[in-house]
Amino acid sequence: MTLDELRERIKNEFVLHEGNVADWQWTRTGLPAEAAELGIPDFLRLVDDVSRPLNAQFGKILDLQAQIRKVATDNQKKLSDVQIGGFALDAERLGLSRAFVTEQWVPRLVAQLPDAPTTESPVGSGSSGTSTAATTTDLMGAGTLASPVSGTGQAGTLMETAETMQQKVCDILDDYKEHIPAPAIRALFRAINYDEKALADAVLAYLTANFYASEKEPQGSTLREKLTSTDWRHLVWWDRAGQPTNVSPTPIPVQASASPALGTLPPVVATKSSSGWRDFLVALLIAGGLIGFVIVLVKSNGSSKTEEPVPAEQVQRTNDEEPRKSTKPKRKKRTKPQQEVTRNNDIEATATAPASPRDEPYEVMLDEVGQYGERPAKKDGQWGLWRKGRWMILPVYDKIDVYKEGRARVTINGNSYDLDRNGDRIRE
C-alpha cells in the first residue's frame, strides 16, 4: 500500500462513519499497522492531516448522503446503474472516488435502510396498477439522476437552497488568488442553479467583503452582465508598485438608472476611470507646479543673500548720519537650523501622504503573541494580525489565531483554513 492509498482509505472511513471515528476504532480497521509498515510513526497526526481539507466538503457530502437515502427509499432500496452513476459523478466533485461510491458507500447506505412494508393487492385489479406505478417511479428516479450526466431531465429545474448557493460561491471564488477572471464568474453562473438576481447579489457581496475591485468599468444592463464583463483584482494587487493609476482599487456601490424593460437595476460595482491624456495632463500640471515652486523658493533665498548696489547719494547721506546714530550693535535675527526645516518638511510630507491600509490603527488587541511577534487585533468588527506598528495580516477575518509552526488558522464566512507566512491560503 502506498501513502496515497492509505490517505484515501482514511478518508473513506470518515465518510462511511459520517465523520465520527474514535481513536480506538482505527485499530479495528488495520490502518495504523499499514502506516507503521510505511514508516509513519504518528498515525493520528496523519488522520488530522486528511480530515482537515475534508471538513470543508463534509456538509455537501452529508447532503448527498441524504439524497441517496431518499431516492433509495422511494425506489424500495433498488437503484439503477444510471442513478448510481449520477451519485458517483456528484461524489467525484467532492473528492470521493467512483469505486468507493459504487462498491462501498451506496451499498452500505442502502443496506442500512429499513425494509418497506409489503401490502397485498386485490386479485385481478391492483397487481397491474402496482407494477405500472413502480415502473413509473423507477423511470422518474432514473430521469432525475440522469440529468447531471446528460444535461437534461427534471433535475435541471431543481433549485439550490440559499445557504448551499452562498457556500458554493465562496468555495469556487476562494480558489482564485488575488485575480478572479471574468470567465470564472461566467462559469459560476452556469454551475449554480439558482435565481440569477440572488446569485448575482451573492457574488457582489463576496467581492465587496473580500476587497476585490474591477480592472475596468463594468458594462451591461444587468448585474450579471456587469459582473462578467471584467476581471476582478484583490486590494493587495492594487497596492503593489507599478500598477495602473487610472483605476480606483475600491469598489463603489452605485444605483443604476431605471429601464422600462428591467425596472430598477440592483446595485452594481463601478470604478473611477479617466482617459490616458487626462491623467498625463494632470500629472504634467502637478509637476510644473512643483518645479515653479522650487524655482521661486531658490530665487527668494538667493535674493536675500545678495545685496543690491546702493546709489552714491544714499551712501553719502548715510555717512553723514552715522555720527548721530547709536553705535549699539544690531541684534542678529535668529533663523531656524537647516536640520529642523528639513525635519518639518518631512513631517508635512508624511502628514499629507495617503495612509496605507496596513498602517491604520487597530481598535482591540489581544495579549497572545505568535511565532513572529504578531498579536491578534480587531478593527471594524474583523480580526487580523498586528506586528511592529502595522498589519501583518489585514483585518478581514471573523476569527484568527497567531502563527504556530508557520501556520495561522483563520475563519471567514463559516470556512476555516490556514495561512502561510505571506498571508496566502495553504491548500493541502
Image (tube, helix red, strand yellow):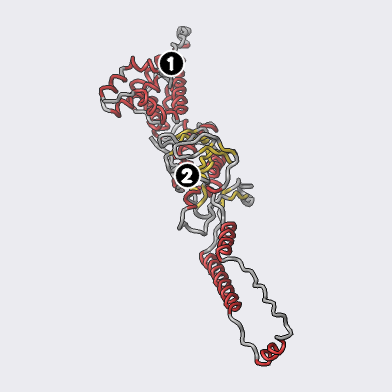
The amino acid type of the residue labelled 2 equals Ile
Q: Secondary structure at mark 2?
A: helix
Residue 114, given in percent of the width and then of the height, sits at 44, 12
Residue 184, given in percent of the width and then of the height, sits at 44, 44
User: Which quarter of the figure has residue 57?
Assistant: top left
In this view, 148 is above or below 248: above
Quadrant the C terminus occupies: top left
Along the viewing direction, whichever of 31 and 355 lies nearer the viewer: 355
Total marks in image:
2
Is residue 242 visible to the viewer in this orientation of the structure? yes
View extreme (right): residue = 324
Q: Nearer the viewer, mark 1 or mark 2?
A: 2
Q: Which residue is mark 1?
A: 76
Along the viewing direction, whichever of 33 and 122 lies nearer the viewer: 33
- Mark 1 closeness class: few <14, some 14–19, many ≥20 residues within 10 Å: some
Q: Which residue is mark 2?
A: 185
User: Which residue is located at x 58 percent, y 50 percent?
Assistant: 252
Q: Is residue 32 left or right of residue 373?
A: left
The amino acid type of the residue labelled 1 equals Gln
Confirm or deny contact between disc 1 and disc 2 (CB under 8 A).
no
User: Which residue is located at x 49 percent, y 36 percent?
Assistant: 369
Residue 92, given in percent of the width and then of the height, sits at 37, 31
Is residue 135 visible to the viewer in this orientation of the structure? no
Q: Is residue 340 left or right of residue 112?
A: right
Along the viewing direction, whichever of 349 and 262 lies nearer the viewer: 349
Along the viewing direction, whichever of 309 and 52 lies nearer the viewer: 309
Residue 80, given in percent of the width and then of the height, sits at 37, 22
User: Which quarter of the figure has residue 323?
Assistant: bottom right
In this view, 64 is above or below 329: above
- Mark 2 closeness class: few <14, some 14–19, many ≥20 residues within 10 Å: many
User: Which quarter of the figure has residue 37?
Assistant: top left
